[in-house]
Amino acid sequence: MNATQTILTGVKPTGSPHIGNLLGAIRPAIELANRPDVASLLFIADYHAVTSAPAPDELRALTYEVTATWLSLGTDPKKTIVYRQSDVPETFELAWILSCFTEKGLMNRAHAYKAKTAENEAAGRDADHGVNIGLYSYPVLMSADIVVHDAHKVPVGADQVQHLEIARDIVQKLNHHAGKEVLRAPEALVQETVAVVPGLDGRKMSKSYQNTIPIFLESKKLRKLVMKIKTDSSAPEDPKDPAKSDIFAMYKHFATKEEVAALAKRYQTGIGWGEAKEALYLALDRELAGPRAKYEALMADTGTLEKILKEGGARARVSAQRTLSRVRQALGLN
Ligand code: TRP
């Protein structure tokens, strides 16, 4: 089947992805990318990370970690073009061009920048304290990441929807100036299926709450963490409502239909929390053991990771160069 849509996924190089990331973003994006009617690109946004000036060795290591994460969880590098943003220099040329079609006021209104200035003002500092131009114009670079490959759709969390609107706005301005549709306006694909995955303390699983279960935790540590999930003080023999249990909510994503039905029954007849946690741990461990082994093998073989990224970069440059020459032509550049 011919690919009818190009889907592009961008991931910032940050460490230790957790179960919340897996269910909310990684799994759905991989399922989409593996569909036969979809052409897909996945890139590690290493230039975006530079806005916070990470240690060079750390940035390199994190780039490998993110790449190994997605590959071990099912991204097929033969189908999906997997690359590092810094291997596609056309992105940055396009970012400059796009910045010339970006109203400064549009950047002033971007959520991330507004949050930063609000934080500064609340602390009695200058509004722009600690804001570099890279951070300020981040949405322009993100727009370039997307439109340089003529992507139709971008799977994102709700927090990124505004960035896609900004991209569309910039594209429209450039197209209007050129008098034709030079660039494609991308659409956000918001993942809402698994809205909130509860963390160890019952709040949304999030790094900032320190309540996460990392995906690649070694089996024993995984068990220990699962045993820490917060529960109420009901007695083991008390009937329990599966719909109100965080353990059950997570179990549903990792167990078979039959297993889920069986556990629901156990809840109704009374189950000790320790037993429920044990069931969850076993399901998680069964599901994650394969990816964990693959992840470790990849991390021990950065040569292979490097090769995949380089090959992906070369493939990604083909569409990027095509877009760039179209844009240059349309704008009267060489
Ligand atoms: N801004 C995105 C985030 O913080 C990462 C990102 C950068 C991205 N460029 C992108 C996502 C292009 C999708 C498409 O998660």
Image (cartoon, rainbow, N blue to C red):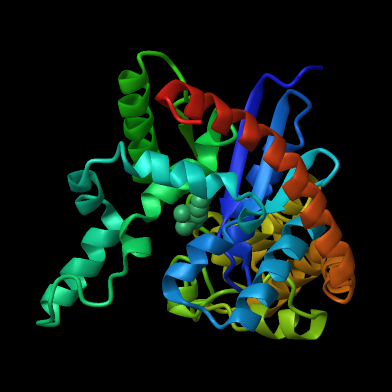
The answer to which quarter of the image holds residue 98 is: top left
Q: Measuring from the top left, give residue 116's x and y in whole percent.
A: 25, 68
Figure quadrant of the N terminus = top right
Is 176 placed above or below 229 here? above
User: Which quadrant of the structure image shows residue 163?
Assistant: top left
Indicate left or right for 44 with 203 as reference: right
Instruction: Name the one closer to the observer, 76 or 48.
Output: 48
Residues 116 and 145: in front is: 145
Please, is residue 235 above or below residue 12 in the view?
Answer: below
Of all residues, the one furthest to the top in this rendering is: 180
Q: How many marks?
A: 0
Please name the residue shown 34% across and 34% down the image: 170
Q: Is residue 151 visible?
A: no
Residue 68, given in percent of the width and then of the height, sits at: 77, 64
* Above or below: residue 214 compared with residue 70: below
- Residue 291 sits in quarter: bottom right
Place of residue 232 in the rendered image (x, y in percent of width and height, measured from the top left): 49, 77
Is residue 175 left or right of 67 when viewed as pictured?
Answer: left
Residue at figure coordinates x 60%, y 50% from the top left: 89
Res. 322 visible in picture: yes
Image spot of residue 83 (x, y percent):
71, 52
Whether residue 73 sits left or right of residue 184 in the image: it is right
In this image, 29 relative to 190: left or right?
right
Q: Could you tell me which residue is drawn at 28 percent across and 70 percent down?
A: 131
Q: Nearer the viewer, residue 255 or 265?
A: 255
